[in-house]
Amino acid sequence: MGVSRLKSIEDRISRIAMFNSGLMLDEFVRRVASSEGIPLDRAAFHVYIAWKKGYIRLGRVKPITSFIGYIFSIEASWFHILTLTVVLTLILVFLVHKPPLIYLRYILGSLFVLYIPGATLIEALYPRGEDLEPLERLALSIGLSLALVPLVGLVLNYTPWGIRLTPIAISLTLLSLILSLIALYRKYTYYRLSNLV
């Protein structure tokens, strides 16, 4: 398929979108398929390309209007996965001491120390997905974790609790959850700004 034909399909999709706002996505894809005379899977592909290139804008039927609503939306699924991972790691660290679950403890414990603190800081600093490439996020997350965890240990060294398993686990949990809540709120503000009409 030539570039000019693809461009014309994207233009026609944007025209269809102008006159059919408020449709559900499946109905919109059906309209594109019937107007273009192409199968549904090709129509869905062209709708996706048109959306990706900015020709059309896909939105929610009912927009999210509050921060609490955003927390329980699909956009905040990363936050729920992170919280579940932290809680599961804490359960494994404090309750599991025998194989075979101890190997899962090693894996999640490494993730908890070497990735999660830096990842939450990166999400708080760069809340938009297009700010950094995924590989850059991964590298910065590991590097910042390697910087944050020793700082937590240094601070704990001067407290009455010292550097032991329980204070370190609680401190890293609090740090990760606080940074993730900051990131969640910053993502919500960008979401709200991008959905203003």
Image: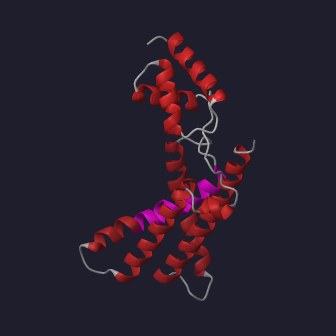
Identity of the residue drawn at 52% across and 58% down = 77
Q: Residue furthest left?
A: 100
In the displayed structure, would residue 3 be above or below residue 15? Answer: above
Depth check: give the residue in front, 11 or 121.
11
> Which residues are the magenta region?
109-127
Q: In this rendering, does residue 92 appear at all? A: yes
The picture places residue 96, in percent across and down from the top left corner, at 33, 80
Nearer to the camera, 61 or 192: 61
Whether residue 151 can be seen here? no
- Which image quarter is the C terminus in? top right
Q: Quarter holding the N terminus?
A: top left
Q: Is residue 66 left or right of residue 134?
A: right
- Between 80 and 155, the one lying in front of the other is 80
Q: In this image, 91 relative to 74: left or right?
A: left
- Secondary structure, magenta segment, majority class: helix
Query: What colour scheme does the image use?
Result: secondary structure
